[in-house]
Image (cartoon, rainbow, N blue to C red):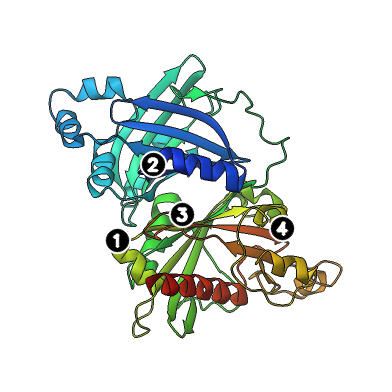
Amino acid sequence: IHMERLHHVEFAVNNGELYLNRFKSQYGFDLIASRSCRHKKQWVVQSGKAIFLLTEFYPVDLQSHVQEAYATHYQDVLSSDPYFSPNTENDIYSNKLETAFNVALKVQNVRQTLETAVKGGAVVLREPSVIKDERGAIELAVIKSCIGNVVHTLIDDKQYNGVFLPLFNEHCSCKNIESQNFIVSHMDHIAFVCSRGSTSSILKWYENCFKMHRFFINSDENAEEGFMIKDTGIGLRMKAMEYWHCSETGLKSCNAEKESDGVKFVLVESLEGQGLNQVDVFLGDHNGPGVQHIGLYTNNIIEAVSLLESWTEIEEVGIDVDILKENGILLDTEADPGVTSDSDRESDTSDNPRYLMQKFTKPLFSKRTFFLELIERVGARGFGAGNITALWRAVQAYMTQGDK
């Protein structure tokens, strides 16, 4: 497989300007591109390597466009919007649901990646095609994920010199993002809420289609059962998978700082007999499985969180606890599933601590079906058991309070 990294994540929203301003003011993202066509308007925001595409569908009868797409006017629709994907857009628009639905992947070869995915069981929503403008050309294809309304656009943009994709109006001419100082540097992970009992089959699907591998969340995780939280009002099972360059070459000591070039997915399902919790609420409000949150990596979580309200607690940590408390940041020192050998333990000393700091934001959408997480890692690649429990408890408490 020739996956490189996450390219962008696309959101379907009802008010694009609202979310554009929110990403700019609260998270330090910049507007880098935009475009309009006959049935939607789009804005592209970026911070480091984290790119979000905000898509607002116009209140028109999209069904007519879809009927055209399946009939003789298909080429006319494509000429007005080369990115039009009827199988995807009809589903998103008909539900009128605010959702993160398109997890786009940067690949080295679209056709080879698509061939592997189809052999693994993927359904093709859009065959490979080339889109170009004066800045160059890209090739893309779209496949349906096995998770709810999620799709994956496969993009090969190595022949493109613009800031995003062809036919978008650029608002920023800077393509070299490495040298800039961003609050958010990249997407650390994407978490999907799944139907109960489905995480194992989803892991298998991504292994077959994208050659992703199981990633153990922390040292407490059971290989078969995953990492489970059984708490009052919270019954969750979590499993994770990843794709990164070193896994292809057999190297297991990739620099954590370069994990911006990896892809890490976390799967969450509810446990039976634990009562209604946030996972079940998501499935109801979202009309099924989908993207629940995205972890945004930051090199300075205190600075990043200072832009947001503080609404949770932390456990004792090895840096200034008062500053972390003031900003509602959680810290966990048991977040590395890789600390298994004597050499690993020797390196995990007070001189070389491994820990991560995290904070969940309040839900982004009105139906509370999506939120963001800020995360800073110091040596740790996994997710600490204490943090996971505390974070999900905080989200559960927030949602319970909102229902009163």
**Measured Cα–Cα span from mark 2 to mark 4:** 29 Å
Q: Residue beneath label 1, please?
A: 288
Circle 1: element type: loop
Task: Look at the numbered discs 4 and 1 and tell me whether their residues touch, using CB distance below 8 Å.
Answer: no
Question: Looking at the image, is mark 1 or mark 2 nearer the viewer?
Answer: 2
For this orientation, the residue located farthest to the front is: 404
**Measured Cα–Cα span from mark 4 to mark 3:** 20 Å
Looking at the rendered structure, the kind of residue marked 2 is Asn
Q: Residues within 10 Å of mark 4 (few under 14, many from 20)?
A: some
Q: Earlier in the sequence, mark 4 or mark 1?
A: 1
Residue at 68% x, 74% y: name it.
334
Circle 2: element type: loop
Question: Looking at the image, is mark 2 or mark 4 nearer the viewer?
Answer: 2
**Measured Cα–Cα span from mark 4 to mark 1:** 35 Å
Q: Earlier in the sequence, mark 1 or mark 2?
A: 2
Q: Which one is nearer the viewer's eye here, 319 or 241?
A: 319
Q: Residue beneath label 2, please?
A: 15
Left or right: 178 as drawn, with respect to 146: right
Q: Earlier in the sequence, mark 2 or mark 4?
A: 2
Q: Residue beneath label 4, please?
A: 302
Circle 3: element type: loop
Task: Judge whether residue 3 can be spotted in this image.
Answer: no
**Measured Cα–Cα span from mark 3 to mark 2:** 12 Å
Q: Residue beneath label 3, please?
A: 364
Task: Judge whether residue 168 can be spotted in this image.
Answer: yes
Looking at the rendered structure, the kind of residue marked 3 is Leu
Q: Position of residue 1 (x, y in %)?
A: 47, 45
Circle 4: element type: helix
Q: Position of residue 34 (x, y in %)?
A: 46, 28
Residue at 43% x, 68% y: name it.
268
Position of 184 relative to 198 (above/below): above
